[in-house]
Amino acid sequence: MADEVLFEFLHMEIVAHVYKEQQGSKGDMDNKERGQCISVLESMGFRVGQGIIERLTRDSPSFKDELDVMKFVCKDFWTKVFRRQVDNLRTNHQVNILSRTLSNGKQYLDQAPKYLAFSCGVVRGALSNLGLESVVTAEVSIMPSCKYDLNIKKTISSAVLYSITNLVFILLQVNSRL
């Protein structure tokens, strides 16, 4: 319990520091500056996610396919990192959770994106280290619940890529003989 509280305080201070550094002596920030702050927080989370998944999968066998990776991320990884199970997982990789780090109330709804950028980066970094290129976004419509959308970019498997490479090589050989 104490670890969770300490992390939440550290997280709030990191967010405040990143925004304060970007703001400097200026008054209000424009959308471009806010976007830069969110990008910095997301990239920090990305590196943290890479490190966490390295530790969690150190003694695990490799995953067979994308479905195994998503099961691991939503069951084991999510529980270790967020100390909560995923409330709802749909086949389109939308993850619904109730986040404790978000305050309850409509007045905080506009502040939610800056506090979710780090956690989106953590998930994206973990998926990246597991071989899945992704885009992770978070949406808050009613506080304190949060919906994470994990968009996995489809990649060509190595077997398919090997077959395509062999086919191209054979076609080149045939063309060179003609």
Image (cartoon, rainbow, N blue to C red):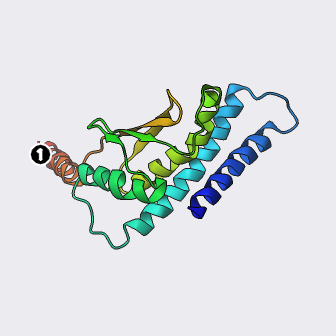
Point out the residue furthest to the bottom here.
59
Q: Which residue carries the number 1 mark?
A: 174
Q: Amino acid at mark 1?
A: Val
Front-most of residues 64 and 79: 79
Q: Is residue 99 left or right of residue 3?
A: left
* Residue at the spot 71% in from the left edge and 32% down from the top edge: 33
* Residue at the spot 31% in from the left edge and 69% down from the top edge: 60
Location of residue 89 with respect to 11 vertically, above or below: above
Q: Residue 165, image x and y in percent?
A: 21, 50
Q: Residue 109, image x and y in percent?
A: 60, 28
* Residue at the spot 73% in from the left edge and 44% down from the top edge: 16
Q: Residues within 10 Å of mark 1 (few under 14, many from 20)?
A: few
Location of residue 12 with respect to 137 vertically, above or below: below
The number of numbered discs placed on residues in the rendered structure image is 1
Q: Residue 134, image x and y in percent?
A: 40, 43
> Which quarter shows the C terminus?
top left
> Which quarter shows the N terminus?
bottom right
The answer to which image quadrant residue 96 occupies is top left
Front-most of residues 119 and 151: 119
Location of residue 5 with respect to 107 vertically, above or below: below
The answer to which image quadrant residue 31 occupies is top right
